[in-house]
Amino acid sequence: MRITTLTFIAFYLNGAIDTGRYDDLTVAEAKTEIGNGTIFDFLRQRLGNDIDLSILTKEDEAELLSEWQDLLAAVNERRKMGIEMRGLPLLIAYLLEGIQRRLPR
């Protein structure tokens, strides 16, 4: 997946955060949706017009979901990413981690 695709989604999530309408979406809620494999449907429903995921193919969604589920199992988001309260910043942190993983070393 292209890094530009990841940044595109991150910009939308950042804009959604800026509205203040999703401050009640918790880390626990986002983690549950990731764990259940329903995060993209959840985002479409919950954020509505504040997000456009049409750039993602089903294969992209599957790739991101797998990556996020791996992060969910392996990473302490508070310690590594500084995230402990809100779910959308967690998703941005996961996208940033994905960008780092895709950059040449």
Image (spheres, helix red, strand yellow):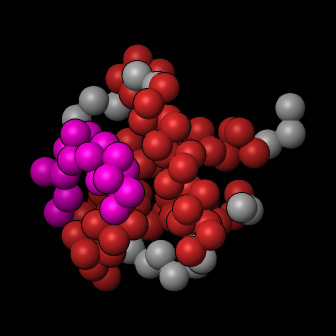
Quarter-wise, where is residue 39 in the image? bottom left
Q: Is residue 40 left or right of residue 66?
A: left
Vertical side of 12 occupied by 71: above or below:
above
- Residue ID at (31%, 82%): 49
- Residue ID at (47%, 75%): 53
**30 falls in the magenta region:** yes
Start and end of the magenta stretch? 21-38
Q: Position of residue 77 (x, y in %)?
A: 40, 27
- Residue ID at (22%, 39%): 28
Q: Position of residue 90 (x, y in %)?
A: 38, 42
Q: Is residue 55 left or right of residue 83?
A: right
Q: Is residue 101 left or right of residue 6?
A: right
Q: Quadrant of the C terminus?
A: top right
Asked whether 79 or 21 is in front, the reply is: 79
Quarter-wise, where is residue 72 in the image? top left
Q: In the orientation shown, which residue stands out farthest toward the front?
A: 36
- Residue ID at (52%, 37%): 70
Q: Is residue 86 visible?
A: no
Q: In the orientation shown, which residue stands out farthest toward the right?
A: 104
**4 falls in the magenta region:** no
Vertical side of 7 occupied by 53: above or below:
below
Q: Position of residue 23 (x, y in %)?
A: 18, 51
Quarter-wise, where is residue 1 in the image? bottom right
Q: Position of residue 35 (x, y in %)?
A: 35, 46
Vertical side of 81 occupied by 61: above or below:
below
